[in-house]
């Protein structure tokens, strides 16, 4: 009788179950039977069995359990039952040591140019990307681009670049990841979770980012450096005052750069002083009522005053 583990398809399904569940199902005959039928039939439910067939299936469940225990005995480092995330972390850290971070590889599925229908060439060098994953946290992977030299078109995961402009595919949000820049990719389920929390609970993005960083232990910059140089999620102030300060600082810098460097021969160009506010710039002269003049002893001239309706 052929061993279950000689079949590579069955072995692959069994490894998946061990990664997801561990070996606890081996202690419960009923659960072990469910797992055996899954890895053998690929999840297809067979017809109901009579008593004799059920007896034979019971023997098959025992044989399957024995072969699985034998496989686990050979697995001295317990890699098969350590869980998907821990296995992923081991693989990710190994790729970093090799100098080729491939925790995830993003590459377009297209093989021909969308313009001339010619064959696309694959770039031999990958480009490092920071991934934000809903389950694995932040890690490093790579993106690989394809190109058509004739049309000067570059295919990326979820989009393409042409004429110096980047375009997204219509179905890019149906992919597993969204490549938002050359160096950043978000797990789409993570974005959907953020959107749901924003819609239902009015959760600010800064709070969501802080929760994400806390969940994976990214509380300090040093922690992030130790975690394979992954990056923290950037936050945007949601407080109106804080956001206004940032905007004003940007505008103030640009304003000074444009106007303080300007000097011309027009009288008063260098000696203008602005007092009060800028509301007068938006007022019409005819809107001022009861206009009068104020005089002060010792001060030459007068001050024109008026009441704004």
Image (cartoon, rainbow, N blue to C red):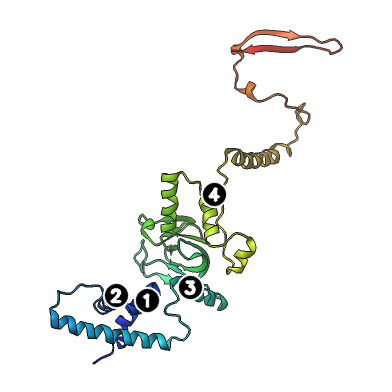
At 45% across and 52% down in the image, what residue appears? 194
Q: Which residue is mark 4?
A: 206
Q: Are marks 1 and 2 in contact (CB under 8 Å)?
A: yes
Q: Which residue is mark 2?
A: 31
| Sequence order check, earlier mark of 4 and 1 | 1
**In the foreground, 152 or 280:** 280
**How far apart are the alpha carbons under marks 4 and 1?**
40 Å
Q: Which residue position holds label 3?
A: 86
Pick the quarter of the image with the N terminus. bottom left
> Which is nearer the N-term, disc 1 or disc 2?
1
Could you tell which of marks 1 and 3 lies nearer the N-terminus? 1
Q: Earlier in the sequence, mark 4 or mark 3?
A: 3
Looking at marks 3 and 2 on the same chain, the residue that comes earlier in the sequence is marked by 2
Residue 190 in the image, given as x and y percentages of width and height: 44, 57
* Circle nearer the N terminus (4, 2): 2
Farthest residue, direction bottom: 1
Q: Give percent across and percent down for residue 81.
A: 42, 78
Q: Nearer the viewer, residue 127 or 190?
A: 190
Report if residue 148 is visible in the image: no
- The quarter of the picture where residue 189 lies is bottom left
Crowding around mark 1 (Cα neighbors within 10 Å: few <14, some 14 to 19, many 20+) is few
Residue 115 vertical position relative to residue 267 in the rendered view, above or below: below
């Amino acid at each position: 009788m052929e061993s279950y583990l000689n079949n590579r398809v069955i072995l692959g399904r069994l490894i998946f179950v061990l990664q997801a569940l561990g070996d606890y199902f081996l202690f419960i005959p009923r659960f072990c039977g469910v797992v055996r039928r899954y890895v053998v039939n690929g999840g297809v439910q067979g017809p109901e069995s009579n008593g004799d067939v059920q007896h034979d299936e019971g023997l098959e469940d025992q044989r399957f359990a024995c072969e699985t225990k034998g496989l686990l005995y050979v697995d001295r480092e317990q890699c098969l039952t350590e869980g998907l995330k821990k296995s992923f972390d081991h693989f990710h850290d190994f790729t970093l040591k090799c100098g080729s971070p491939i925790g995830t590889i993003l590459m377009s599925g297209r093989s021909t140019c969308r313009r001339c229908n010619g064959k696309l060439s694959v770039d031999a060098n990958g480009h490092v990307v920071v991934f934000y994953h809903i389950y694995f946290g932040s890690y490093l992977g790579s993106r690989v681009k394809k190109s058509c030299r004739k049309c000067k078109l570059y295919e990326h995961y979820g989009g393409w670049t042409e004429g110096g402009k980047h375009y997204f595919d219509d179905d890019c949000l149906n992919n597993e990841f969204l490549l938002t820049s050359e160096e950043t990719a978000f797990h789409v389920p993570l974005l959907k979770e953020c959107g749901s929390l924003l819609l239902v609970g009015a959760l600010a993005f800064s709070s969501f980012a802080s929760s994400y960083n806390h969940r994976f232990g990214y509380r300090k910059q040093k922690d992030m450096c130790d975690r394979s140089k992954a990056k923290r999620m950037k936050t945007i102030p949601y407080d109106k005052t804080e956001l206004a300060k940032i905007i004003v600082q940007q505008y103030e810098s640009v304003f000074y750069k444009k106007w303080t460097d300007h000097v011309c021969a027009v009288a008063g160009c260098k000696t203008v002083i602005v007092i009060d506010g800028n509301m007068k710039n938006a007022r019409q002269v005819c809107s001022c009522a009861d206009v009068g003049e104020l005089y002060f002893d010792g001060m030459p001239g007068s001050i024109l005053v008026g009441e704004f309706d």
